[in-house]
Amino acid sequence: MSALSGIALADWRGQGRDFDFCGHAIRYWTAGAATAEPLLLIHGFPTASWDWHYLWTPLSQDYRLIACDMLGFGDSAKPRGHAYSLLEQADLQQALLDHLGVNEPVHVLAHDYGDSVAQELLARHHEGRIALASCVFLNGGLFPETHHPVLAQRLLLSPLGGLIGRLFSRKTLAANFAKVFGPQTQPSSAELDDFWRLIAQNDGPGVMHRLIRYIPERRAQRERWLAAMQQGGVPLRLIDGAVDPISGAHMLARYRELIPQADTVLLDGIGHYPQTEAPGLVLQHYLAWRQALASRHE
């Protein structure tokens, strides 16, 4: 699927470390020189930070990489009965930066659910609660009015959500990913196995109906997050897989309507997971943008 070699899941897991967040064990990863500019990578729903494995080694040549499996995801704790929140996940990202002693402005690369966490961090930047240096979004529901959730997401939000979550399986995942990946960039069976291992860890399906509450939370935060994106001061870019039915070309078009001097890249034929479907293109467009930003400040 990729010209970049990536990192096998077993090897990725072996590189992880844990820290405590409000009594919950959170798995996180770092790479690159401690003196390099920090780059925080924020994964999406329902997957985990392994989503970045194709980009991890090449990005670590230039930046200090930081990523965690958020609460309820991957190899991190998945507490039952927990009121999961995007705002809490933003707290988690800040706690991880504090844990690692990162005090300088942070660059962010986010995807899907992680886009919403990044939007919250951007709002906090303008409130003086964190310093961001830049933010790049991959496919995600940046604007609730143009986010088209798949049937499984709608069912998880319904009164039957708990049951739907417990019934979620590798077969369900494969069916859903087949719809949201590009026609020529479908995940292999082995990749689906690995995505599923991370979801299934710590009985992840048992909390999916609680994690999905991010969809109404996005609606509640829309105006605050939009104002933060429109305010300027933090360079933004959207790199978007065009054929994603959830947040593809239609989301990019809305971004261009709402964001002043919108900087966007549309990846033809690519679906909802550009960092695994076309990681070479994502890397190319990310690095070129960062180099352009750096040249402006020289």
Image (cartoon, grey):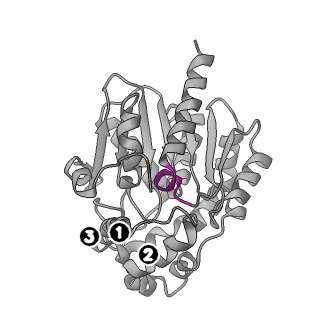
Residue 114 shown in magenta: no
Q: Residues within 10 Å of mark 3 (few under 14, many from 20)?
A: some
Horizontal side, residue 15 vs residue 245: left or right: left
Label 1 amino acid? Ile
The answer to whether the residue labelled 1 contacts the one labelled 2, judged by CB atoms less than 8 Å apart, is yes
Please tell me whether mark 1 or mark 2 is closer to you in this view: 2
Q: Residue at left 69%, top 48%?
A: 226
User: Which residue extends farthest left?
Assistant: 14
Outermost right residue: 257
Q: Which residues are magenta?
A: 272-278
Q: Give the vertical position of 214 relative to 289 (above or below).
A: below
Q: Which residue is mark 2?
A: 173
Amino acid at the residue labelled 3? Asn
Residue under label 3, please give it.
Answer: 202
Q: Which residue is mark 1?
A: 199
Q: Distance of mark 2 from mark 3, alpha carbons?
A: 17 Å
Other residues around mark 1 within 10 Å, as few (<14) / some (14–19) / many (≥20): many
The N terminus, quarter of image: bottom left
Q: Which mark is residue 245?
A: none
